[in-house]
Image (cartoon, helix red, strand yellow):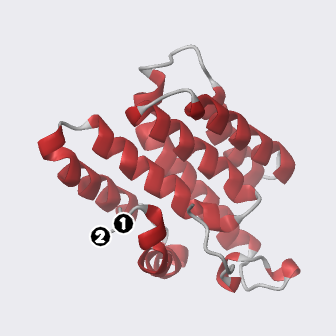
Amino acid sequence: MILPKERDPRFITLRRGGSLTDADHHLLALWAADCAEHVLPLFESAQPTDLRPREAIAQVRAWTRGEIRMSDSRAAGGHAMAAARVLTGPARHAAFAAGQAAVVAHVAAHELGAAAYAIKAARAAAPTAEAENAGRRECAWQRDRLPAAIRALVLDDQRLRNDICWSVFD
């Protein structure tokens, strides 16, 4: 479970009674897509003919450009997560990262799911003795790519939800 029981109004759009602007929602989605895309080769090396996770990332990017509806991105996320369910290890986590990124269009708070699964993928791909360091490097890579407009929001979200995200943001 990566979502809190109570939704944080900072991740609810203005039109739904929260404080999240559309511009920041799009930045969250693009950052989540970057996180997922960074580990996508871990999926594609295991499942080179399955395009669902790559398509999910493309769909959320298209949503941020206004080219598709939210429901199209959300559906692509579900397909990417279906690709993950039959796998284990880094490929599974990478596909879940892509799925989580795509559903940011529907629920902005899934941004942390994409990041957390990408860190899990990096850890799982590393030799056991290097797993923690691989996860820290992935987390640092992600944080380096946070747009200034959402940086404080995401870092605070990582602090608040670290426990339900497998403590990957330590």
Circle 1 crowding by C-alpha within 10 Å: few under 14, some 14–19, many from 20 = few
**Which quadrant would residue 99 be assigned to in this image?**
top right
Residue bearing mark 1:
167
Say which element carries label 2: loop
| Displayed quadrant of residue 27 | bottom right
Amino acid marked by disc 2: Asp
Going by the image, does 22 lie left or right of 162?
A: right
Residue 75: x percent and y percent? 79, 41
**In the rendered view of the protein, which quadrant contains the N terminus?**
bottom right
Location of residue 143 in the rendering, given as x and y in whole percent from the top left corner: 38, 65
Please give the name of the residue rendered at 41% of the width and 79% of the height, measured from the top-left corner.
159
Amino acid type for the residue under numbered disc 1: Ser
Cα separation between marks 2 and 1: 6 Å
* Quadrant containing the C terminus in the rendered view: bottom left
Residue 170: give its label: 2
Q: Is residue 1 above or below residue 91?
A: below
Which sits in the foreground, 38 or 116? 116
Kindly give the residue lying farthest to the top in the view shown: 49
Answer whether labels 2 and 1 touch (C-beta < 8 Å): yes
For this rendering, which residue is in front, 94 or 129? 129
Residue at the (40%, 61%) spot, across then down: 166
